[in-house]
Structure formats: C-alpha cells, structure tokens
Amino acid sequence: MNIKSQKDFFSGLMFMGVGVAFAWGASNYTIGNGARMGPGYFPLALGVLLAILGSVITFKALVVETVDGDRIGTFAWKPLIFIILANLVFGAMIGGLPSIHLPPMGLIAGIYALTFIACLAGDKFILKEAVVLGTILAIMSYFAFIKLLNLQFPVWPVFAGV
C-alpha cells in the first residue's frame, strides 16, 4: 500500500475511529426514527457521517498524489499536555475534588486557571494578555451561563466554614 499523504491518511483513520465509537456508543440508547428521534439518534447519525467522511479522506490519501507526500511532522507534546491539563484543572475547580479535600472554587477561578494554563501551551507567555483574555472569558461566561441560562453551579469559591 502506497500512502500518498500521511496527514490525510491518519486524519481519515482518526475520523473513522471516532465515528465508529460514537455509533457504537449510540447503540446503547433508543434510536427511534426520523419522526420520533430517541436519545441515540443524533450520536448514531453523527458517528456514521464521521466514519463515512473518514473513509473518503483515507481513500483520497491512498489515491490522490501530493507534491511532497504530506509527511507528518514532529508531535507537539507541549501544547497537547497543557491544553489537556487546563481542561482537567478547570473541571476540578468547578466541581472540586473531595478525595483531596479541594472545595469547588467556582466558575470565575476555574476560567482564570484554564486561561493561564492554556496560555502556557504557546511559544511565549505574556501575563497581561492572559489576564485580559481570562477577564473577558470570565465576564462572558458569567453572563451566558449564570444570567442568561440560569445554570446553578458555584460562581465563587465555596468554603465549608464560611
């Protein structure tokens, strides 16, 4: 097998894998039909579409010639680690971690932590830009989730003794 574009080939495989996982996960729910959709209808449809898209991309990577072969470059570990870490810290700050006695720190503190950690994923970290971005995200999230959608979760740190 002669792969003409490594990037497209592995992207197609990724799409197929995610699509199959979504479709398989949807099989545990009621699918329903087009007129009365069940909770598994949308994930199944999305999974099938992703798998088809992945198949087309993978096929094109095997058939269509590219100029330089579209080689896969080095893996960017730093951004991957910091972005995943930022999301994990955000989740822990929103809900707290009872196993280590970390109380919920609230939406605002979680967004600032998410922003600062995610900003470390780039080539350079500028504190002023991270503070401005965190402030904008915190204000917009507060109005979107708390004021407009009336979601009920802590906005500020919640301490047991206070």
Image (tube, helix red, strand yellow):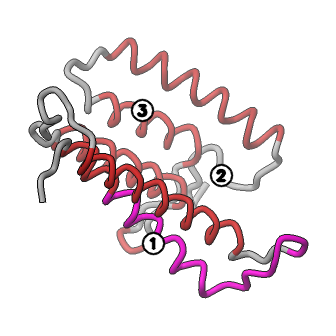
Q: Which residues are magenta?
A: 13-36
Three-letter code for the amino acid on which mark 1 is drawn: Val
Between the residue at mark 3 and the residue at mark 1, the CA separation in whole angstroms equals 32 Å
Secondary structure category for the residue under label 1? helix
Three-letter code for the amino acid on which mark 3 is drawn: Thr
Residue 77, image x and y in percent? 16, 43
Secondary structure category for the residue under label 3? helix
Residue 3, image x and y in percent? 15, 50
Question: Which disc, if any, is residue 93?
Answer: none
Q: Residues within 10 Å of mark 1 (few under 14, many from 20)?
A: many
Examine the rendered structure and indicate whether residue 27 appears above or below residue 9: below
Three-letter code for the amino acid on which mark 2 is drawn: Pro
Which mark lies nearer to you, 3 or 1?
A: 1
Q: Residues within 10 Å of mark 3 (few under 14, many from 20)?
A: many
User: Mark 3 — residue?
Assistant: 115
- Mark earlier in primary sequence (3, 1): 1
Question: Which disc, if any, is residue 154?
Answer: 2
Q: Nearer the viewer, residue 134 or 41?
A: 41
At a point 25% along the width and 20% down the height, the residue shown is 125
At a point 65% along the width and 51% down the height, the residue shown is 154
* The magenta stretch spans residue 152: no
Which mark lies nearer to you, 2 or 3?
A: 3
Secondary structure category for the residue under label 2? loop
Residue 126, image x and y in percent? 29, 14
Between the residue at mark 2 and the residue at mark 3, the CA separation in whole angstroms equals 18 Å
Between the residue at mark 1 and the residue at mark 2, the CA separation in whole angstroms equals 36 Å
Residue 9, image x and y in percent? 25, 51
Q: Which quadrant of the figure has residue 20?
A: bottom left
Q: Are marks 1 and 2 in contact (CB under 8 Å)?
A: no
User: Mark 1 — residue?
Assistant: 20
